[in-house]
Amino acid sequence: MDRSQRSVSACIALFFTAPLVAEYLLGDLSIKMLAALVMLAPMYGGGALLIREVVRRTGRGWVSMLLLGAAYTLIEEGFTTQSLFNPDYLKMHMHLLSHAWIPALGIGAWWTLFMFNLHTFWSMGVSIALVEALFPARAEQPWLGWLGDSIVAVLFLLGCAWGTAYQLRHDRFLASPAQFIWVGVGCVAFIVLAFLAPRRRPRTLPGETPSPWFTGVLALVLGLGVMFTPPFLNWGAFALILAMDVIFLALVGAFSRLATWTLLHTFSLGAGGALAYGLHAFVAPPLFGGWLVARVSNAIFLAAAVAIIVAGARRTKRALRATAIAQAVAP
């Protein structure tokens, strides 16, 4: 299989992995609703693929990836679903905004931060990390040309348009003009910051990086911490999640600058995050369908995630060994 074929395979994998992680592995949708994947993929998968392509094509790294993931969060939850502002999202009576309510902005601080975690770290970050590990030889290179990227951008816009139409068809809520303006300003700010972030440079700092097992467990434990933080703690919940975010970003930021950091470490973060999602799904109340269908679905999607993790670990290790051998025999 040549590089172009492998790139197409990688694109297709990410296009469908992102919605599978975001909605199915999380437990929001069951196996009975798998057909909805076709409608969800353009927004989730198109967004993840577009973010990855832009970052890799411009030679940037995960700082830019996460900043663009934050911009994606505002696009989906601020413009498309408007859940950041809707006090009764889809008439489900979940009171999402009542926790750490900020009247001046019309948002709930807990829900807003929670959404930034779910989409920035999981929907985008975990999905990209898992799929790049399946194709390690081109993990830091763009997978498409400009034409392909343009097609992905159109698919993403169509996905957002469909998501917005679906939302308005089932819930006529509209945020205020001021709220839409602030969401737009936030999107632009995150995008600008992503391009102001420095380009990726070779890691040269001395020091011993912890085992990928450690970084994977770190992502798993902190991920479960975010998912299991009870929202009724209100500002306490906001503070706990923010503290876990800071700890995660600080530790990963420090470790990833060391020369001994490898693609396997990056992959381990995605693997730990995926497992946190899959395990949490078993105790989350199903949003749609019955309890039995939900739990069977949770088991199926967690098993699929484990299979991807095993395959990604094997491929990444094989690629790292090949690189080490090539460097050893190089003149």
Image (tube, helix red, strand yellow):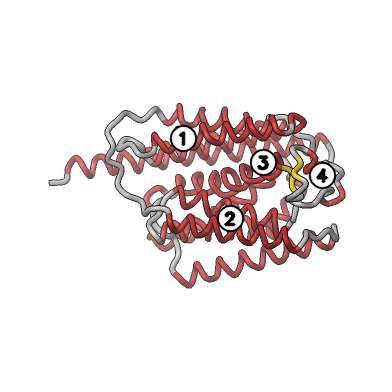
Dot placed on the residue nearer the N-terminal end, 1 or 4? 1
Given this view, does label 4 or label 3 mark the residue nearer the observer?
3
Q: Which residue is most to the left?
A: 331
- Residue under label 2: 71
For badge 4, the amino acid type reads Phe
- Residue under label 4: 288
Q: Is residue 210 above or below residue 133?
A: above
| Viewer-proximal residue among 48 and 115 | 115
Answer few, some or many: residues within 10 Å of disc 1's Cα (few below 14, many 20 plus, some between 14 and 19).
few
Q: Residue 255 appears in which quarter of the rendering?
A: top left
Dot placed on the residue nearer the N-terminal end, 1 or 3? 3
Q: Residue 258 appears in which quarter of the rendering?
A: top left
Is the Cβ of the residue at disc 3 closer than 8 Å to that at disc 2? Answer: no
Left or right: residue 102 versus residue 195 is right
- Residue under label 3: 114
Dot placed on the residue nearer the N-terminal end, 1 or 2? 2
For badge 1, the amino acid type reads Ala
Q: Is residue 56 above or below residue 318?
A: below
Dot placed on the residue nearer the N-terminal end, 2 or 4? 2
Dot placed on the residue nearer the N-terminal end, 3 or 2? 2
Q: Which residue is most to the front?
A: 104
In the image, what residue occupies the spot 74% across and 36% down?
296
Q: Distance between the residues labelled 4 and 3?
A: 21 Å
Is the Cβ of the residue at disc 4 closer than 8 Å to that at disc 3? Answer: no
Residue 46 horizontal/vertical position (percent): 58, 60
Q: How far apart are marks 2 and 4 (CA)?
A: 28 Å
Given this view, does label 2 or label 4 mark the residue nearer the observer?
2
Q: Distance between the residues labelled 1 and 3?
A: 19 Å
In the image, what residue occupies the spot 65% across and 42% down?
113
Residue 123 horizontal/vertical position (percent): 60, 48
Mark seen at residue 250: 1
Is the Cβ of the residue at disc 2 closer than 8 Å to that at disc 4? Answer: no
